[in-house]
Amino acid sequence: MKSDTKSASSSASGSASTSGAKAAGKDAGKASGKAHRAIRAIRAVRTPGGLSVRLDARALTAVVLLLLAALAASVLLIGTGDFPIAAGDVLRTLLGDGNAGQEFIVNELRLPRVLVGLLVGASLGLGGALFQALSRNPLGSPDILGLGQGATAGALVVIVLFSGDAGEVTAGALLGGLATGLAIYLLAWKRGVHGYRLVLVGIGMSAIMTAVNGYLLTKADLFDAARAVVWMTGSLSGSDWDQVTPLAALCVILVPLVLGNARALRMMEMGDDVSYALGVRVERVRMLLMLAAVLLTAAATAAAGPVSFVALTAPQLARRLTRSPGPNLLPSLCMGAALLVTADWVSQRVFGADQMPVGVVTGVLGGVYLLWLLVTERKAGRI
Amino acid sequence: MSAGSNSSGPNNGLNNRRSTVNRLSADNVTLAYDQRVIAEQLSVEIPDNSFTVIVGPNACGKSTLLRALSRMLKPSQGRVLLDGSVIQSMPAKKVARTLGLLPQSSIAPDGITVADLVGRGRYPHQGILRQWSTEDERVVQESMEQTGVAELADRYVDELSGGQRQRVWIAMALAQQTPLLLLDEPTTYLDIQHQIDVLDLCAELHEQQGRTLVAVLHDLNHAARYATHLIALRGGEIIAEGAPNDIVTAELVEEVFGLRCQVIDDPETGTPLVVPAARKARAGGKADVTKVAATEAS
């Protein structure tokens, strides 16, 4: 990436206030790798008519690479199972050129599962990025705030108390997630308070919901309990086209809406006062984006169960790739999709088809990441 | 933008004194947070092209007044007028192109560079299809040069000193290109050299570019030295306003701050200089000890 930098990097240490600029020059000094200068290339594409769009070369590259990774993992995932299909055949079949047997396996059995995986991952990645940006805290993500537990409670109520079918469970999860989101908003957000307060309220909500879920499980008979536990781990198995359509529709509506407000959200990183001063209608944008984030998370959870930690990790990993301040919405979305499908592929390769729900893999990976995050955040003095 | 044309206006009656219609004013506002009333029926005019400084003891409502003037706090009664319109009813971005604010608390996002941060000041001039024009680029460069941070353009904001960081935030507010600029305690947390540095910069912006500046300051001597128009607040009421030379007297300081003092001429500038009375003199006098303690604690 160093070739397309706008500015050279200065030596790492001791560049005090006055000297810094001159030291920069053309030569990067010691190639110490600990450059304090920003290594970024932001270009604007302008038309003669006065239109201009800002492009961050690095973020754009990250998005393209992540999309390719998600695609590759999807093809591999479609090829994996009791009847393995080579990647080339998968592609051929997807383009409508396969034999009848492969066509059935790919289009009817495995493609919907992969699409649900991509959509769930994308929704969680975007929802997580929104929450983290709105709370200005990497811990302010749906996993920690108890949205997943809230959605689970909704689903369990349907499973245990009403023995509802799959569609009703989905509706229950959606309602549970929305209700939890509303409760968190009312308790933590009413006067525009962020950060710690949100995280603490979220942890409280999460504990309450976990207790409710535990209670519901003990009340359930064996069959319902088994069904509930599978749902609670977060699994893509059994996904069909009925789950793809509503999730895709929701994404088609919400993603452009969210991305349209991305610039305002970037301003809100600097605090409410600054963003007001810059002409952002803070309360409106916050309400809108929070609602979108809750909907995305709840819908993803309703479709695949609480797949843990994707919403927490995807934005952080995306940010480390783009090295860009700001909410990194699109990279987070792509990262979420790539992460989830890859995790599903890993779980199927390592443990065999449908032996290990994807939520276990993301849980293990995400848990390790969370520990690392807690340690580094502590060092940075933010916890 | 309508203030430039003074041919027609809401009150072009018999004696149309155009100088009396200022761009920014508060008209009988009552300011409150929830139930706690900070000021009642307060009216303030910010003279055009002035460097107005608001002073007063802690909790006198000076920051609250600034928040109201910048439409961050909606008055529970009365209205704040910007160019003749009620500020709350104006489109947010339009206000942001006319009136800038440097708040006390602002967060520099992790890993943001100086140029990026200053560039964010262009937000009210941008749209989804007009994200970064050559004009934006020019103004950002200019703002950084005016505030002396152009050399730091590619540095991370986190690693700057407090004084440099404040200059960067001022540069961001400048990039907004507003004829009116409000600053909420711009010198807090800075050492004396950087306080003067920031105030000099403000004076330059006021004198050379004809911007109207409104600042809340803690230091009365700084206020008297730099302000062209001083507003002294106590308990949500204006006790005095006018040019520092006309209004800063020992009586006023005692009335506003509860501090006994002498006011002498500043040997450097000739502006009023407040010298607090010696401790013994104050203890012997009738000055309320608790009041003095409260003022000193600030």
Image (cartoon, grey):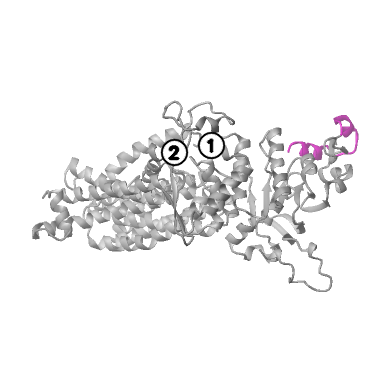
Q: Which mark is residue A39?
A: 2
Query: Which of the numbered marks, if any, corresponds to residue B158?
Result: 1
Which quarter of the picture shows residue B277?
top right
Would residue A118 be found to the left or right of residue A199 on screen?
Answer: left
Q: Is residue A308 magenta?
A: no
Q: Judge whether B167 appears above or below B49 on screen.
A: above
Q: Residue at x 41, y 45 (%)?
A: A144
- The quadrant the N terminus of chain A occupies is top left
Seen at 50% across and 59% down, the residue is: B127
Toward the viewer: A352 or A255? A255
Q: Amino acid at mark 2?
A: Ile
Amino acid carrying label 1: it is Asp
Which chain is mark 1 on? B
Left or right of B98 on screen, residue A216: left
Q: B119 and A289: which one is in front?
A: B119
**Subunit ID for the residue under disc 2:** A
Q: Does A67 sit left or right of B154 as displayed?
A: left
Principal secondary structure, stretch drawn in magenta: helix
Seen from the viewer's position, the closer of residues A29 and A151 is A29
Tell me what residue is drawn at x 16 percent, y 44 percent: A352
- Residue A184 position, x and y percent, is 47, 53
Residue at image x 53%, y 37%? B158
Point out residue B70 in the picture as x, y percentages from the top left corner.
66, 55
Q: Nearer the viewer, mark 1 or mark 2?
A: 2
Stretch in magenta: B277-298
Q: Position of residue A63 (x, y in %)?
A: 34, 49
Q: Is residue B281 magenta?
A: yes
Instruction: Specify whether disc 1 shares its chain with disc 2.
Output: no
SS class, disc 1: helix
